[in-house]
Image (cartoon, grey):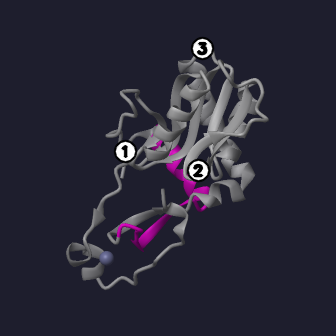
Amino acid sequence: MTENPHDQLVLSLFKECDALLQGHFKLTSGKHSEWYFEKIRLIEKPAALEKIVDLLVEKIEAEVPDFDYVVSPAYGAIAIGFLAALKLGKGFAFTQRSEEKMTVRSGFAGLDGSRAVIVEDILTTGGSILEVLACLKEHGVTTKGIYVLVDRSGGAVPVEGKAVGSLLALKVEAFEPDACPFCKKGLPLTKPGASDKK
Ligand SMILES: [Zn+2]
């Protein structure tokens, strides 16, 4: 998928926590793919996740000089953002959907008017990050950076004109069933859980 040595390191860390699976998968879109991210596995194995978050923290420290909070959308990214905030010495808050709208719990008293970095697990369409941006804007928060562990758009999706920093930009090829090379080889098809849904 990628020859870059840094990408290879990140890939091996994802494989270490079984978050990146290789096989023949039916995606929620109905298309078939050789690769599948089981992102819930990231938080299932904290020690493996910590190594991945260390790389993310290094990147954020190098690129964003000044901010106050790490903000992540519930639920999958909370552990990732929290761990990053702890290592960066920043505050942490999360957003959650309440009646379809992305909101911040009123208990996060210091967030309003602050400067934040958004941390999300996987960027697919950018939909949930857009919702977080809008939500933070309502709270007078300046977004200083947007980071994801894996950019599945392969760097194709800027969010509101802002670049999205990722540890791994990976365009995963997906095939219509009748054009799928793995179907042609007769490999058994796996339908993973709904955790890939965004
Ligand atoms: Zn197939």
The residue wearing badge 1 is 3
Per the image, the residue denoted by label 2 is: 13
- Amino acid carrying mark 1 in the image: Glu
Where on the picture, by quarter, is residue 103? top right
In the image, residue 146 sits, relative to residue 4, either above or below, namely: above
Whichever of labels 1 and 2 marks the residue nearer the N terminus, that label is 1
The kind of secondary structure element at disc 2 is: helix
Image point 41% across, 68% down: which residue? 28
| Separation (CA) of disc 3 from disc 1 | 30 Å
Label disc, if present, on residue 111 of the rendered structure: none
Tell me the residue at 63%/60% (across/down): 41
* Residue 31 location (% of width, % of height): 32, 69
| Distance CA(mark 3)–CA(mark 2) | 27 Å
Q: Is residue 17 visible?
A: no
Question: How far apart are the two marked residues, 1 and 2, measured between alpha carbons?
Answer: 15 Å
Q: Which residue is mark 3?
A: 65
Neighbours of disc 1 within 10 Å: few (<14), some (14-19), many (20+): few
Range drawn in magenta = 6-29
Q: Are marks 3 and 2 in contact (CB under 8 Å)?
A: no
